[in-house]
Amino acid sequence: MFEGPIYGFKKQHMYEQCPHCGLKFEIEPGYFYAAMYVSYAFSVAEVVSLGLATAFFTRSESPWMYIAVLFLAIIIFAPFNLRYSRLVLLHYLSPKVVYNPRFESELEK
């Protein structure tokens, strides 16, 4: 679905259509705005789990420790959240996108 590596200096680019089967990824205009909510859920889960892990392992009471750890986590996981929130949205919330395993064998004929 995406062109190029997940981490890099280039802007992340999503194909408009699948290069293999030609499926149009954006089903309707603004379809992936809903992926922001999925990305938000990912971010909350990451921040809560890393906050608890930081508290458990460091036993620190300094808010700056938590701010630094959580800020770094948000920056590091942002490309991951962008890509996988769109994948989750397409996989679970879209009845129009269906993978047909026989499609590959039909292409070869």
Image: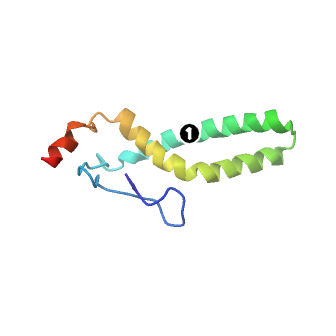
Q: Where residue 107 appears, x then y in whole percent?
A: 17, 47
At a point 28% along the width and 39% down the height, the residue shown is 97
Q: Vertical placement of 98 versus 76: above or below? A: above
Q: Residue furthest bottom?
A: 9
Q: Residue at x 36, y 46 (%)?
A: 31
Q: In the image, 46: left or right of 68?
A: left
Residue drawn at x 53%, y 46% as measured from the top left: 81
**78 up-or-down from 59: above or below:** below
Asked if residue 73 lies left or right of residue 21, the reply is: right
In-image side of 72 versus 8 (left or right)? right
Q: Nearer the viewer, residue 1 or 106?
A: 106
**Residue nearest the observer in this picture, 50 or 4:** 4
Point 59% across, 42% down: residue: 43
Amino acid identity at mark 1: Phe
Q: Which residue is mark 1?
A: 42
Give the image location of residue 25, x and y in percent. 31, 48
- Helix, strand or loop status at disc 1: helix
